[in-house]
Amino acid sequence: MKRFLIPGLLVIGLGAGLGWQLLPAPLPQAWTPQEAALIQSLSLSQLHALSPDPSNAVADNESAAKLGQLLYFDSRMSGNGEVACATCHQPERYFTDGLPLAAGTALGPRHTPSLVGLSHSPWFYWDGRKDSQWAQALAPIEAGHEHNLDRLQVIRLIAKDRDYSERYTALFGELPSLPATPQAASPLGNAEASASWQRLSLAQQSGINRAFANLGKSLAAYQRKLLPGPSRFDEYADQVSSESGISGNGVLSREEIAGLKLFIGDGQCISCHNGPLFTNFEFHNTGVLAIAGQLPPMGRYDGIRLAREDEFNCLSDFSDAQPEECIELRFAKDDNELVGAQKTPSLRNITETAPYMHGGQIADLTAVMQHYNDAPTSMLSHNEAKPLGLRPVQLSQLVAFMQTLTAPLNVDPGWLVAPSQ
Amino acid sequence: MTFRNTAAAVPLAILFMLPVSQLWAQEANYSIQTSKGSTLDVFSQLNPVVINRIHSWELALTGPDESPVTGAEIFVTGGMPDHDHGLPTLPIVTRETSPGRYLLEGVRFHMPGHWQLTVTINSPQGDEIGLLDFEL
């Protein structure tokens, strides 16, 4: 008998170890009142109406949204005539591109974020260097690796296109009178465009800037239409209470419910991915590896400084807001906690928007869960997240829960395609 | 005056003795006792206070004798001790809206859980400090 003892103990030990790794823990009969409240707080039915944007007088104007939609899908808005906003923010991919790094006229330094529900965010870009959706919309047009155009050529395009100029004039009044030369000019352009910009009068510069800002405001009006639709999770969350059984209305599997329990509990995901959009739109350093070939970015630490200096921010001449309405910008913090911090993305439709993180560094959701379980040391400053010590089966449950957040958009289909003029 | 009239007059008299603002204002969301026995009542303009919405607080400062304290400088800092991080914004008292009432602008909380704020008050009666713990 003795010769079977050690192998037998080994088999039992291995079995117990494997079981601990792979067997799910039993679920309780019901949610606690605190858990039920947290689950309800995540439901899309709890999403407040989109706040007005005082810096954009046409934010909720249908004609502006239509002009914005035309611009959004128009590849003439690029230096090579091949790149539109929709090139990277593709409607059929929940307004992402499926690539680690954005590819406009050249390969960019950051992953394309989804635009769905983004109009609820007070800050734009991964590092929050823009404080409005209209100010953000202007930057890619002039970025060398995105549209690679300049503001003077953009206004020339609007002036030459009869449909555009009529729509523009109806919304904002006359276009500025444009100089015969130069053809291209921008303070942010290459040396030639920049020198051309300096030769324009201040009045010409101001007129071009104002028209350029108005196009950004139209693009923002369009993007405010892009809202998420209710998913299986919402159907479950809307009937959850501490009195009802944990299985609820049966729309979620046991594995998905176990993932939800971890999401609001031991996984601590809800700390940042909270509210109906599963994001606090704030900035956190979670120890994500630097993007290959790049230094670790300073993140929001630089982003808030850039937002304060931005020529199109809420306090600028081109904003429609009174200074006291620029609350986010006036009371933004800028301390060392923000070094290496990137904006929390929404988890709505997350299964359809791989790869993940600000540089698309992580290919799939399983690897994302492993990253948060490990919480590696940050290359810059400190990782706010701490190791979770979750078992493999629990990481799988979290991934399963992510599947419940995908749904068709809550958008009239007419807004999701290139419009005919 | 009959007994019935007198009975009606007493509550009416009390009603008119109360300052109107206190009578009709919302209940304080939070109340902080300071190190020198003053009281700082917090009236949130977002009521109830929820996460992810930037808003303002009105702070009502009264001394130990319950009279409004005017001309104070009030600084609010804080964060989540369990997460080892601060507030997501830099809230600032921008003005005293009426004697003893101060407007704190730029308040936002970005996570559910335990928050702890430290209020530092510099007033003509000296420096004092107060702590506020609450759950969101």
Image (spheres, coloured by chain):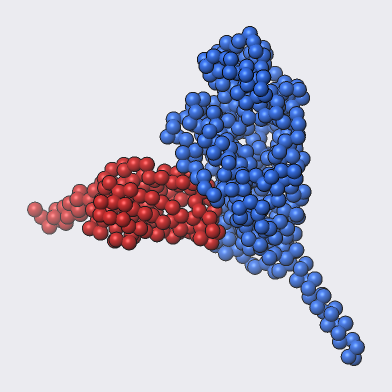
Chain colours: A blue, B red
Question: Is residue A207 visible in the rendered structure shown here?
Answer: no
In the image, residue A212 lies at what x, y percent?
59, 22
In the image, residue A56 lies at what x, y percent?
53, 28
Residue drawn at the location 38% of the way across and 45% of the way down: B93
Q: Is residue B38 left or right of residue A377?
A: left
**Looking at the image, which residue sits at the far left?**
B1
Asked if A66 appears above or below A334 in the picture, the reply is above
In the image, residue A36 lies at what x, y percent?
58, 59
Asked if A206 appears above or below A254 in the picture, the reply is above
| Residue A306 found in image quarter | top right
In this rendered view, identify the residue nearer to me: B135 or A29: B135
Residue drawn at the location 58% of the way across and 44% of the way down: A300
In this rendered view, identify the residue nearer to me: B65 or A26: B65
In this rendered view, identify the residue nearer to me: A342 or A58: A342
Q: Is residue B15 left or right of residue B102?
A: left
| Residue A217 found in image quarter | top right
